[in-house]
Amino acid sequence: MDQNSIKLTEFIQHNGLSVANHGLMHGNTGISIYFYHLSRNTNNPAFEQIADDLLDKVFTNFSSAAPANFENGLAGIGWGIEYLVQHNFAEGNTDEILEEVDNKIFRALNEENHSSFELANGLTGYLWYLTSRLKNKTNSASMAQRINCELLIRTINMLDEMVTNQFRSVVKDLQFDLYWRFPMLFYGLAEAFGLNVYNEKIRCMIKQWLPYFEAYIPSLHINRLFLAIALKRICSLVPNKRLEKQGQNLLFATDFEILKTEIDHGLLNIRFGWPGTAWILYMASKEIPDDWPNYHLISKAYREIMERHKDPMENFTIENQQANGIQYGLSLGLAGIGLLEIIWPGILSGNFSNEMSGDD
């Protein structure tokens, strides 16, 4: 572990292991994912024990009375548990473990009114949960999986109606948000497409939405780049020349000098801060073809942003972390920063910048 990672982990161990939230984005479920990855990465069983203890807290406080949403509720917790089992961090039959969660999601989708397709508190969060459940092939013929398959179809139908209606009232994006609803929706649909459950419907939805996307240029330049990546992801599964052309148009319309001014360099979190922007630039360098407009500016912007953050932990001390309002979860906290660096080593230290294609 480098010194930044050691300091970050110490911060979480000192004050981040007693949070009352048990959800995925801000609580113990997400923090346990960080420590499981850290244990595997360092071959240190002490970190695995911390992760086990955090997950025990989640199960001890598990209640169907909790909200259903992805951000703080059962959909996010269930997604996290599926993630841990499918990546061999934990063992168990998730049809049994997540029976209460499945029931809660069933009721939420069939009995509640929905007006949002945000990831955190809307239909896209349920889409992510259901696709994660159906990716687990251990019990693919079980009753739970068959019900979740029907729920996935229902969710996609609801998204079709909701997104189509809300396109007409899209408002200007004023703040960078890694969980911005359009890319998160497309990533969810791409995962659903890989299940081969309702693919013709997804194809029809993309075709139906084409005119809206062709007429839509996000206000923020970072969102233009973000949406271009998401459209390219969809095009890799559902080839469409018009959609690919719109992705190219978005990249052409991205001013990377302005993009650098849209970032809040004082926020050390993945959702709203500069680390989320670094991740988008990294993904763009890997997923966008090098013959698209302005491709060569992606790695240049990344290097210049990272030059401002050579030591992202330099201003933190254990004594003043509460005074600075430091959080510890995946979304707005240090566990998210640590997990980002583990999964993509060097992304926040700039160590892989020379490996990014498209350099001048």
Image (cartoon, rainbow, N blue to C red):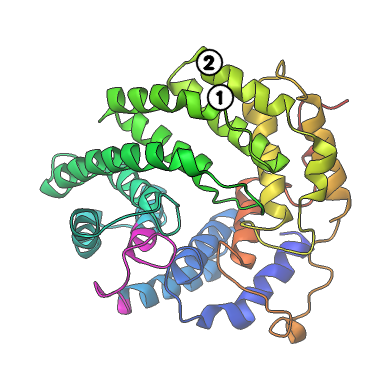
**Residue 139 seen from this side:** no
Q: Nearer the viewer, residue 188 or 3?
A: 188
Q: Quadrant of the C terminus?
A: top right
**Residue range (magenta):** 60-78
Say if 70 sits above or below 222 in the image. Answer: below
Q: Which residue is painted at 18% across and 41% down in the image?
A: 150
Q: Hey, which residue is sitting farthest front in the picture?
A: 168
- Which kind of residue does numbered mark 1 sit on? Glu
Residue displayed at 59% across by 71% down: 328
Question: Are the residues at dot 1 and dot 2 in contact (C-beta closer than 8 Å)?
Answer: yes
Q: Residue 310, can we see it? A: yes
Question: Is residue 67 covered in magenta?
Answer: yes
N-terminal label among 1 and 2 = 1
Q: How many numbered discs?
A: 2
Q: Which residue is mark 2?
A: 242
Q: Is residue 195 above or below residue 245?
A: below
For mark 1, what is the residue?
A: 214
